[in-house]
Image (tube, helix red, strand yellow):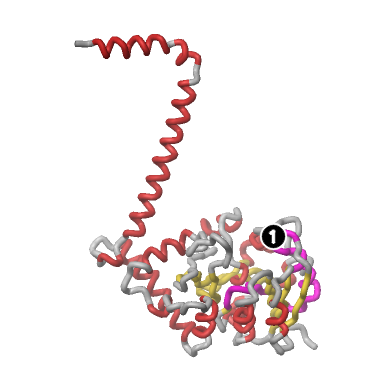
Amino acid sequence: MSDPLFTVLMPTNYRPDVIGYAIQSVLDQTEGDFELFVVGDGAKEGTADVVLGFSDPRVRWFEFEKAPGVGYPNRNRALRESRGRLIAFAADDNLMLPDHLAKMAKVFEGPGAMWAYATAFWISNDGIAAPELINFDLADERADLRASKYVVPAEGVVYRASALPTRAAWPEDMLKAGDTALWNRIIDAQGEASMRRVPEATSLHFSALRKGHPRDSWSPLLAAYLMVADRAAWWPAMLKPPIPEGETEQAVYARLIRQPGWTEAARLAAHDVVNRIALNHLSPRIRPAPEESNEGLKIANLQRDLHAARQQSAAQAKALSRIEHSTSWRVTRPLRALGRLLRRRKP
């Protein structure tokens, strides 16, 4: 049997409720030359039943005890058995758009490609979709990645298996943030000229289901988009589908992405969103309607000013405390008391 083009690695821990949608989105890829490794890292009860319910021979289930952190040692245990020429990733709570692997494979057809990335739609926990904006062709954004200031969702990344000496490349000495460390290790080894970009969204990245996790998943960009989407009458309906009570966002979008033409229409809608926001921001001759005004920007500026004022107030209180506890303050206390007494006695 010949080696597959892709090994797709899908770690899982606690999402048996949605992993079935994630697996199906991989199986629905227009590029079908892959093996899918679903790696249970102390997976929640019921996960194995969902995975083993798929009869497709490309799906392989690995069930391991929980490893430290987010389970990098277990990922390496599975990858040692992988055969794909390209290594791709999938999350148990995210979805691949149908042409994700095909578009990623295309950029590896040219010479010198070792590491590639695509953008994603970020999905709020109430179902609003907004496009991620990254371009590592630009030096400043690439510098942020290299300095580990920017996190690329793993499902948007593919690299050539031969880029590193071993397939078991996840940093087992790290408990988290190992993906960015791995990307930089590959780029260090192969050079920045080996990086490739797919300039469109090829996956759906959902907010994590964790206690206290906010609507925007702590993404400043998604938070800014949501301020617009909540007010703008023009926000595309297909990027704001209703989420029925009792259903997950993944279930709703899993149905949508299987509809013919939805993916391309969503990309076009995202392009229109970015253009409209840019137009409203850049053109002084455009007066936005009230519902699409720059209220989000005003709120952000007010929050920034409030934060600065609080910091200044705290600094002043700290300085005053130092003065009040100083020797000179104690020595001059009688003089200050005398001054207050004289002021009260003035006619």
The residue segment tinted magenta is 68-95
- Residue 113 seen by the camera: no
Residue displayed at 70% across by 80% down? 36
- Residue 34 seen by the camera: yes
Expressed as whole percent of the image width and height from the top left, the position of residue 39 reads 73, 73
Front one among 335 and 152: 335
Determine which residue is flagged by label 1.
185
The answer to whether residue 102 is magenta is no
The answer to whether residue 75 is magenta is yes
Residue type highlighted by circle 1: Arg
**Looking at the image, residue 33 lies above or below residue 148:** below
Residue displayed at 60% across by 82% down? 25
Expressed as whole percent of the image width and height from the top left, the position of residue 149 reads 57, 55
Front one among 270 and 10: 10
Residue displayed at 54% across by 61% down? 213
SS for callout 1: helix
